[in-house]
Amino acid sequence: MTVSKDDKWTEKKISRREMLKLTGVGMAGVAIGASGLGGVMKAMGYELLEDDSTTAQNKVNFYGPHQSGIVTPVQTHIYFASLNVLLTSKQELQELFKQWTPLVVRLMNGETMVEATTNTRVPTGDTGEAAGLDAANLSITVGIGPSLFDKLAMQHLKPTALQDLPHFPKDQLQQEWTGGDLCIQACADDPQVAFHAVRNLVRAASGKVEIKWSQAGFNSFPAKGGTPRNLFAFKDGTGNPTDVQELKKAVWVDNGWLKDGSYLVARKIQMHLETWDRTSLKDQEATFGRHRDSGAPLGKTQEFDAFDVEEKDSNGEYLMPDTSHTHLARKSGVQMLRRSYSYASGVMSNTGAHDAGLLFISFQKDPAQFIAVQNSLGRMDKLNEYITHRGSAVFACFPGVQKGSYLGEALFNAL
Amino acid sequence: MTVSKDDKWTEKKISRREMLKLTGVGMAGVAIGASGLGGVMKAMGYELLEDDSTTAQNKVNFYGPHQSGIVTPVQTHIYFASLNVLLTSKQELQELFKQWTPLVVRLMNGETMVEATTNTRVPTGDTGEAAGLDAANLSITVGIGPSLFDKLAMQHLKPTALQDLPHFPKDQLQQEWTGGDLCIQACADDPQVAFHAVRNLVRAASGKVEIKWSQAGFNSFPAKGGTPRNLFAFKDGTGNPTDVQELKKAVWVDNGWLKDGSYLVARKIQMHLETWDRTSLKDQEATFGRHRDSGAPLGKTQEFDAFDVEEKDSNGEYLMPDTSHTHLARKSGVQMLRRSYSYASGVMSNTGAHDAGLLFISFQKDPAQFIAVQNSLGRMDKLNEYITHRGSAVFACFPGVQKGSYLGEALFNAL
């Protein structure tokens, strides 16, 4: 990350590396020299950056109707932090978001938190561990939890939908992984870039916020592209809404100060890998309702094949067992946008079993969608035998920001 | 990961992707078509793989005089596991290493643990989460700890050098991060590939080993290449030995059953990021003895500039303070190969501070080298104010394996 005085990357500007990516040189080889490529790209309306510094690379746009990190293509790493707010007034909260907004822009641009200074006798404006790294497609998504409205006497603006989730069968929630006044979801194609973002935003708000809980996670994508697998080896995210109409229906809030925002549900789900690994492939597939290798619904051959949960074979048995995860989830009739990450580090001190699982994250127009799916899974879901929900939180993620505005402006305008 | 009946990758064979990498197409653009490139490569003695499947990509060689994961170029991710052995005899231990050896080869080839089977009524031979991912430069390094020799009545073969490390000033070791009979260090450019390797080797040895402690970590490399930064933002690994003579002197054991092997020292070092971040750049640089941005020794301009710790300025002050980490480490006069990874996930439950730091790993001919450096740092090292050692372990890592042999054969031949 280097320091720049102004945002010098316009959408039309493109680095040499991006150009090579776009034109597919890295994939198949083409018979055009470098200068020839530049000409082609220029004709297409792209301007080749003079300064091919790393900072121009792999940048997600901050500004737009929605926050980044929701429909942004899933990155390989997440650092998710749930924060307690130490502030005592709405005004201070507004100041915090006004302070954070340009910092988020800088981080997503692959820049340092502040301009460099020659004064070495004060703490540095940026903690520095992302120096030399590019923006790594960093997205930052900010949301506020139900407890914040009570803390800062803003109950009248608390959306009815923003409530702590109800208790679900098999929940074994631990306070150390549950709740929070505010969240920062930092996703990037580099774990150090994601952590750097959270660390520096929290540091810039020292005395105003503290981390209640945090979780790092990863997704690994097949070299040939496609849906990543969770630690049970099943593809995760196949049924996600994809087109604008589906997203409008399932993900974006359509009224009030949260219009064009979305509700984020986070669940820390421990996966009992050792138990799972002792199960036959047939039972694993009957548990998910899908084929492990292809991701196809049981009875179908391709991952994205359409299926009807009521379809039965010649013996009158469901093709997709009615206790399977996919069967029950589909039966709820609701969609949400899942954007989960695996975690694996350490062992359970009492058993020596892997402390591993899924940081489940979903975005929806209303947490009721998540609740409906979870209730449909209920006590029936065969997957319950292999997982335990350890943490839970829900946040209202602000709409996107236009230039000149700041995160959460609509909320403060409504106060 | 796909299943192959035989090892079809020879050193001379090369995938299209590797070819493009080698010829630098991705970097600068060249004016040769794909077929032309193939001709050039063929003339250089490379054979282009017919089957350009993902499994052929990014593969580290298992066989050789030394184990992989020591001088292998540092990958972006580690999954390090320290294991307790549940076995009761040397013979069973030998069987374990004979069992593991071909499995390690398969994993490093980007293959599944075993041939695929059509029997879906038994647990699968491979846990499957690496399906579709390539080998990701996976290296696997296996070592044995001092406690193993006592457990299995092999004390007469325990090298004198293989002892638990002595207590150092400022150590606050916790049993849950300390010791172990055996270690598996899995490093890869994909966290899921590294975790998959440890998970499957431990699973294949179910009832024979159990995980005592494990730690995931990451390193982020500048797009332009160079030394990665730790979470204090300083480049870590600058002073490493690089050429064959230096490695011979500092890293490889030169006699006994461990000849061509090396000692691995692992230290889980918590970094107090919040305290560090309140320190001025000048103090940070005086603590490390290097410039943060460039990595240059204090008073020099380039990362790899030579320096003399005794050099003073015109006022008679050391250019590199005599309480700085680099000054004291260099003063010990010994070298070792550092191969550390950062970790960051979660917060300390009592303080809300980041639970982050460094999984320090070094390889040396004798743990005495690490002890000498640590003693030189002693109570003087200014860095002590910002770190706490939480875990410690030492392992004797076997020499490399020749085809037809197995991990640790020299040890069992010496029994």
Image: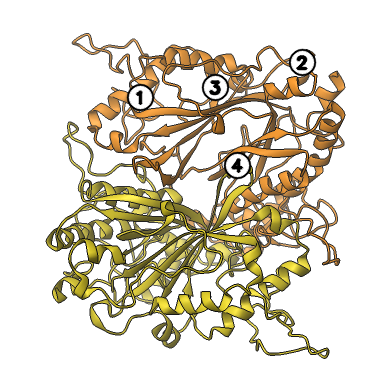
Chain colours: A yellow, B orange
Judging from the image, mark 3 belongs to the subunit labelled: B
Q: On the image, numbered disc 1 is attached to which residue?
A: B383
Please determine whether, in this image, residue B290 is positioned above or below residue A374: above
Circle 3 residues within 10 Å: few <14, some 14–19, many ≥20: many
Look at label 4 and name its amino acid.
Answer: Asn
**x, y percent for residue A308:** 65, 89
Q: On the image, numbered disc 3 is attached to which residue?
A: B336
Indicate the secondary structure of the residue bearing disc 1. Answer: helix
* Front in this rendered view, residue B293 or A91: A91
Q: State the separation of the CA atoms marked 2 and 4.
A: 30 Å
Q: Name the front one of labels 1 and 4.
A: 4
Q: State the separation of the CA atoms marked 1 and 4.
A: 34 Å
Q: On the image, numbered disc 4 is attached to which residue?
A: A350
Please determine whether, in this image, residue A198 is positioned above or below residue B79: below
Q: On the image, numbered disc 2 is attached to which residue?
A: B155
Left or right for A217, reference B181: left
Left or right for B185, reference A84: right
Q: Are marks 2 and 1 in contact (CB under 8 Å)?
A: no
Q: State the separation of the CA atoms marked 2 and 1.
A: 37 Å
Look at label 2 and name its amino acid.
Answer: Gln
Residue A394, quarter of the rendered image: bottom left
